[in-house]
């Protein structure tokens, strides 16, 4: 049956935008480091300047072959174009709402703010090193945690040598802050 007569979607809604927008607390800014901003900008330009034109060529070629209903190149190409366009819209919105914060402004400071790399020890004696970054930059496997995460919120504004309390689903944990560092300013 033709899609025009059914109330089903292809999933074209901006699902990732809705999911990540919900992660930003109401009334808060979308903080991001300069490196994170550049990474998103580079991905956006790659999609606009390279990937989308290539897919458009393939779709144009496939459309010129005749019957589109059983043309795999055409069907896949149109689907890929929708994915690329959805990602372009999402990245554009993220860049428009981004508030770039340079963590090197706090270089030499022992208080924890956005962009700090923090080494802490929990009650079990496990040592962890994390960097507090924006929602769009988060990568837990590399130790990059979002500034809205419970750990980052607990660490923020504390100083090196202090002990803080972290409320977790398993109970209360005490974290001792061992080291705080920021990247050196670029000249």
Image (cartoon, rainbow, N blue to C red):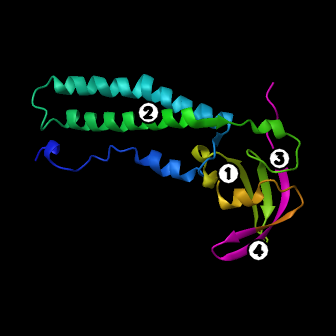
Secondary structure of residue under mark 4 = loop
Q: CA distance from mark 2 to mark 1?
A: 24 Å
Assess whether mark 1 and mark 2 are in contact (beta carbons under 8 angstroms). no
| Nearest to N terminus: mark 1 or mark 3 | 1
Q: Residue at x 55, y 33 (%)?
A: 95
In the rendered image, residue 44, in percent from the top left (x then y), is placed at: 49, 30
Observer-nearest residue: 108 or 20? 20
Eye-nearest disc, 1 or 3:
1
| Nearest to N terminus: mark 4 or mark 1 | 4
In the rendered image, residue 146, in percent from the top left (x then y), is placed at: 64, 51
Residue 35 lies in what quarter of the image?
top right
Residue at the outermost bottom position: 171
Eye-nearest disc, 4 or 1:
1
Chain part drawn in magenta: 166-187
Secondary structure of residue under mark 2 = helix
Observer-nearest residue: 46 or 111? 111
In the rendered image, residue 101, in percent from the top left (x then y), is placed at: 71, 37
From the image, tell me which residue sits under label 4: 124
Q: CA distance from mark 3 to mark 2?
A: 34 Å
Eye-nearest disc, 3 or 2:
2
From the image, tell me which residue sits under label 3: 181
- The quadrant of the image that shows the C terminus is top right
Q: Which mark is residue 88?
A: 2
| Nearest to N terminus: mark 2 or mark 4 | 2
Label 2 CA crowd tier, 10 Å (few <14, some 14–19, many 20+): some
Instruction: Indicate left or right for 95 with 9 as reference.
Output: right
From the image, tell me which residue sits under label 1: 147
Observer-nearest residue: 16 or 30? 30
């Amino acid at each position: 049956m033709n899609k025009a007569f059914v109330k089903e979607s292809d999933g074209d809604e901006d699902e990732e935008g809705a999911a990540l927008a919900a992660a930003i607390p109401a009334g808060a800014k979308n903080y991001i480091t300069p490196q994170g901003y550049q990474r998103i900008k580079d991905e956006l330009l790659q999609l606009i300047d390279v990937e989308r034109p290539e897919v458009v060529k393939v779709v144009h070629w496939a459309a010129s072959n005749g019957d589109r209903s059983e043309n795999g190149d055409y069907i896949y190409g149109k689907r890929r174009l929708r994915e690329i366009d959805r990602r372009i819209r999402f990245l554009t919105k993220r860049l428009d709402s981004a508030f770039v914060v340079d963590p090197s402004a706090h270089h030499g400071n022992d208080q924890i703010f956005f962009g700090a790399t923090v080494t802490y020890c929990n009650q079990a004696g496990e040592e962890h090193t994390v960097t507090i970054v924006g929602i769009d930059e988060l990568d837990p496997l590399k130790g990059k945690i979002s500034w809205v995460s419970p750990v980052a919120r607990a660490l923020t504004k504390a100083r090196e040598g202090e002990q803080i309390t972290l409320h977790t689903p398993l109970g209360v944990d005490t974290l001792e802050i061992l080291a705080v560092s920021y990247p050196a300013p670029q000249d």
